[in-house]
Amino acid sequence: MNNEKYIREDERTPEDLRDIRMEIDVLSNANGSAYIECGGNKIIVGVYGPREIHQKKYSKNYGAVLRCKYNMAPFSVKQRKKSGYDRRAAEISKLITEALKPCILLEKYPRSSIDISIEVLEASGGTRCLGIVGASLALADAEIPMKDLISACAVGKIDDHIILDPSEYEDNNGQADLPIAMMQRSKNITLLQMDGKLTHEEFIRGMNLGMKGCKIINDMQRELLIKKYNGGIE
Ligand code: CDP
């Protein structure tokens, strides 16, 4: 399939991300926060911590416990979602926690917790990846020491074309979905999921495209943080 000439339902080329807007320091009561809009997605993230854990059974002597909660507001999707923590939210919370863990210097804060709340206000495909991008920014905003920023984006397949950052329509009607999160400096992949069917060649092409998308998002994250904390001086 000629990927170059393929134009998507929202007029993007296969290699285009949706427009992204990121902000940090949007909440006054959290230690760090971020807000992300991407296509029809609106996601807000708050970080609390590191805070001392008083109950011994929940604390770890060798480092902070990372607790991440992904939640979709009832009004975030077209068909009102029942409020509360369902199986999907529990699974996504777990995988986001695991995706973020390798980049945080948890060992610096024994017997403490770092809590991340990801609230999806409007969902339109790709919320787990955007949640990771927002959480990474909010952690930096909270000045929690990290080895690297984590960026994330998904790759999909629709009409036999490999595409970057599937929209909700493409997510629902596509042939495959491949969310990726990575640390930019070390190139370590910290999240890789796949639904659907890809050939080996499509998988390699999809990974390369996803890594390209992560790099673009990482540049945006860095630019935002540099602007905020260095007055624009790199
Ligand atoms: O959002 P993400 O692609 O990471 O996760 P998904 O489980 O593949 O969901 C894809 C999209 O389906 C979401 O972004 C929502 O737009 C939509 N969705 C929904 O309409 N109702 C739900 N209960 C869950 C997801």
Image (cartoon, rainbow, N blue to C red):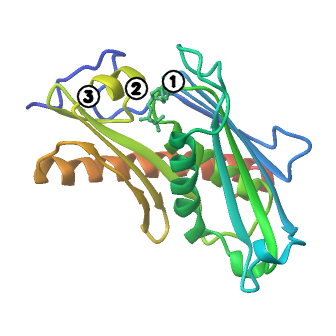
- Looking at the image, how many numbered discs can be counted on the residues? 3
What residue is pinned by disc 3?
174
- Residue 80 vertical position relative to residue 216 in the rendered view, above or below: above
* Mark 2 burial class by Cα count in 10 Å: few <14, some 14-19, many 20+: many
Q: Amino acid at mark 2?
A: Ser
Q: Nearer the viewer, mark 2 or mark 3?
A: 3
Q: Is residue 162 left or right of residue 37?
A: left
Rendered residue at 11%/48% (across/down): 199
> Which quarter of the figure has residue 94?
bottom right
Labels 2 & 1 near each other (Cβ < 8 A): yes
SS at badge 3 = loop
Labels 1 & 3 near each other (Cβ < 8 A): no
Task: Out of 16 and 54, give the one closest to the viewer.
Answer: 54
What residue is pinned by disc 2?
167
- Residue 213 vertical position relative to residue 143 in the rendered view, above or below: above
**Where does residue 39 sit, x and y in percent of width and height?**
51, 24
Label of residue 3 in the image:
none
SS at badge 2 = loop
Labels 2 & 3 near each other (Cβ < 8 A): no
How far is mark 2 from mark 1, CA to CA? 8 Å
Q: Amino acid at mark 1?
A: Gly
